[in-house]
Image (cartoon, helix red, strand yellow):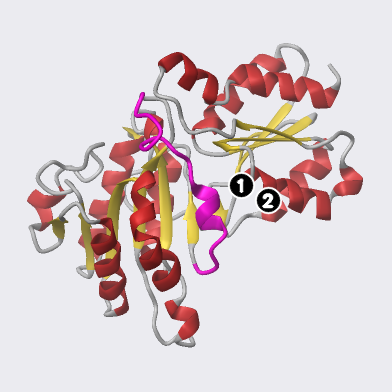
Amino acid sequence: MPTMNFAQALTDAHKLEMERDPNIYVAGEDVGVYGGIFGVTAGLLDQFGEKRVRDTPITESAIIGTAVGAAAGGLRPVIELMFVDFIGVAMDQLYNQAAKIKYMFGGKAEIPMVLRAACGAGIGAAAQHSQCLEAWFMHIPGLKVVMPSTPYDAKGLLISSIQDNNPVVFLEHKMLYGVEGEVPEGAYTIPLGKADVKREGEDVTVVATARMVHFALSAAEKLSAEGISIEVVDPRTLSPLDEDTILESVKKTNRLVIVHEEVKFAGSGAEIAAIVAEKAFDHLDAPILRVAAPFTPVPFSPPLEGEFIPSEEKIIDAVKNVTGK
């Protein structure tokens, strides 16, 4: 099986789907000539031409607004918003239009569009280019929210997202673009709404998203040397959320730690914790703990940014807390 990095896996997914379906087009700031600021759309302009790979003005409301109209008219846009932080100027087009049209028209109109955006801290991009905002989108009925952690998942989930007939917000942590892994040649899909158990264990369930999956796996390896067995569950899709896999894991381990880079207050972990508390409370032998960012904008200062981002050490401390070891 060939090895690709996260960005290359996404590029491959774009190419395969655009070859398959002429109704798919790509649009966004610098997606054409420049190939995307993280290289995800590199080579697409040369292969598919300007009609299907469109560099746009710096107008997020227009990028999303035209995609909604195009999707309603039968095309399948895959648009790049560059940084998820820019979504604020186009929220009406996303949450009031894309998410609601199918419902308001009784299913007679569909919006098969994918909105890709980079998220997350770690490169010193400061408060307006480093946020994780997935909880915003989870709260909107009609949107699907995808957040892969590996190149294999990124390719399979993006293909599934492009083929889906609903609007999908596809979030890519910018610190993962260079992460390498085995990725099958050719097209394959990963069902939206299906979590993946990245590591099996017996003592504690750790539900982690995006970059934090890698931190959790590293923490699990270190804890195994101390006799603590960690099960790492990656939701992959936050909406729809695979409650069954999470609940089954918690019923096995009887303990839960949730790790994400969003701020802790009202983050995705709060919803996961609530679901487990409502549906598996009797299986818990310890309080649910969350490891997440503090309730503050992302700092520019490298030492402060490092402290802002949840660490392996904080995951290890939380696991030891719930196990009493």
For label 2, the residue is 271
Question: Quarter of the image holding residue 10?
Answer: top left
Check residue 268 in the rendering and tell me which mark sits there, or answer none. 1
Q: Secondary structure at mark 2?
A: helix
In the figure, is residue 176 to the left or right of 139? left
Q: Are marks 2 and 1 in contact (CB under 8 Å)?
A: yes
Identify which residue is drawn at 70% across, 17% down: 223
Check residue 152 in the rendering and tell me which mark sits there, or answer none. none
Q: Is residue 29 magenta?
A: no
Residue extent of the magenta highlight? 124-142
User: Which x, y percent locates residue 12?
Assistant: 27, 46
Question: Quarter of the image holding residue 1?
Answer: top left
Q: Main secondary structure of the magenta part?
A: loop
Query: Gap between marks 2 and 1, in whole Å?
Result: 5 Å
Identify which residue is drawn at 83% across, 44% down: 251
Label 1 packing within 10 angstroms: few (<14), some (14-19), many (20+): many
Q: Secondary structure at mark 1?
A: helix
**Does 52 appear above or below 323?**
below
The answer to whether residue 194 is visible is yes
Number of marks in the rendered image: 2
Three-letter code for the amino acid on which mark 1 is drawn: Ser
Identify which residue is drawn at 68% across, 51% down: 271
User: Which x, y percent locates residue 89?
Assistant: 34, 56
The answer to whether residue 165 is visible is no
